[in-house]
Amino acid sequence: MSPKTYHSTYCRNEFRLIKSFSYEERGETRSTDQAATQGSSLSNPKHPAPSHLRRFLQLFESTPTAPPATLFDQIPLASTTPPRAPAAPKRRAAKSTASSALVAVFEDQYRDLRPRAPIPPLDIRFRRFTSLNTTIRLREGRLHVRLSDLLESAPDSVHHAIAHILLAKLYKKPIAPAHADRYRRHVSSEAVSRQAEHIRQTRGRKRLSTPIGHHYDLDEVFESLNARFFHGLLGRPTLTWSAHHARRMLGHYDAAHNTIVVSRVFDRPDTPRCAIEYLLYHEMLHLKHPVRVKAGRRCVHSREFQAEERLFPELDAAKAYLKRI
């Protein structure tokens, strides 16, 4: 019988030393945990009594309720941080399928614009947009139309106008002036404009930064202009720098959230103060002269607005600088 060769291995687990043994017999190596699971005895056959090695290994045997773990398995330490709750799924805007009558309206307008082409399947739904949005897309031979829920109760003539405008834009056809005028008059009406303003306030979100920039403080500039041009009577809205260095939209007044946003591209040391003052003065005039609707058209810069704008003393220098942005 070949002599048994014992090898000892030490591993540190939870600051305790655990010693495991293996032995070689007849050129074969087996671990102690494999021998234990197979029910083989590690004691010498000549000595039926349990050996010291067997008694030593019994100290590390697991409880009967848990499956036997090998001595080489690493026991995970208890986590000190509580488990994170699964992220809630994002809520999407609710949809409502359009009626068959509205589908027939789009089919009629499709036949008028493309009389020889077959009508593709239509998927028309109303969405809870934050404005009077209308979109149309052609995907895999199917037309997907999404309309603002404010247009769901519009007259049939307005639905015909919407269908004509969307299909004409999609297939690059000329838009009939009658349909364009009818849609413009509807969305510019006082009732629809009031509803659109309401949903922008309740559904929309405004990303606000801070009025204090690295080189200019919008609150200080506003108070200076208010005292010089408005006798200090203009209520101060929320003032903020834009989140990005926008160059296309240098500034705007959001009436729904009563906020004036100025592009951060002006917050630098080489920007002349007259440019910042003129830009903020222009938006303050929007606060004084709100948008009006005349004959179905929105009047953004009225005559009174333009007359007061020309009162700015450094108007030419400011506009010349803005053109170089």
Image: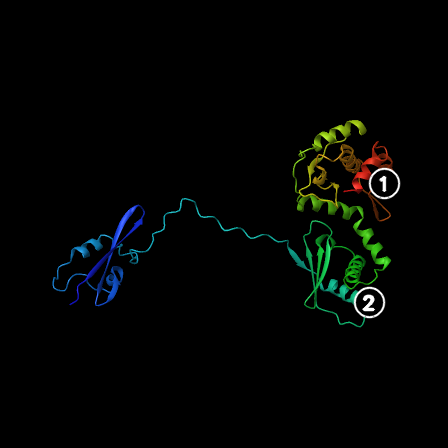
The percent coordinates of residue 65 (x first, y second) are 29, 56
Image quadrant containing the C terminus: top right
The percent coordinates of residue 57 (x first, y second) are 22, 55
- Kindly identify the amino acid type of the residue bearing the numbered disc 2: Asp
Q: Which residue is mark 1?
A: 302
In the image, which is nearer the foreground, mark 2 or mark 1?
1
Frontmost residue, 25 versus 150? 25
**SS of the residue under disc 2:** helix
110 lies above or below 321:
below
Q: Quadrant of residue 121?
A: bottom right
User: How far apart are the two marked residues, 2 and 1, measured between alpha carbons?
Assistant: 39 Å
Frontmost residue, 134 versus 315? 315
Q: Is residue 232 visible?
A: no
- Kindly identify the amino acid type of the residue bearing the numbered disc 1: Ser
Q: Quadrant of residue 46?
A: bottom left
The percent coordinates of residue 210 (x first, y second) are 65, 36
CB-based contact (under 8 Å), mark 2 and mark 1: no
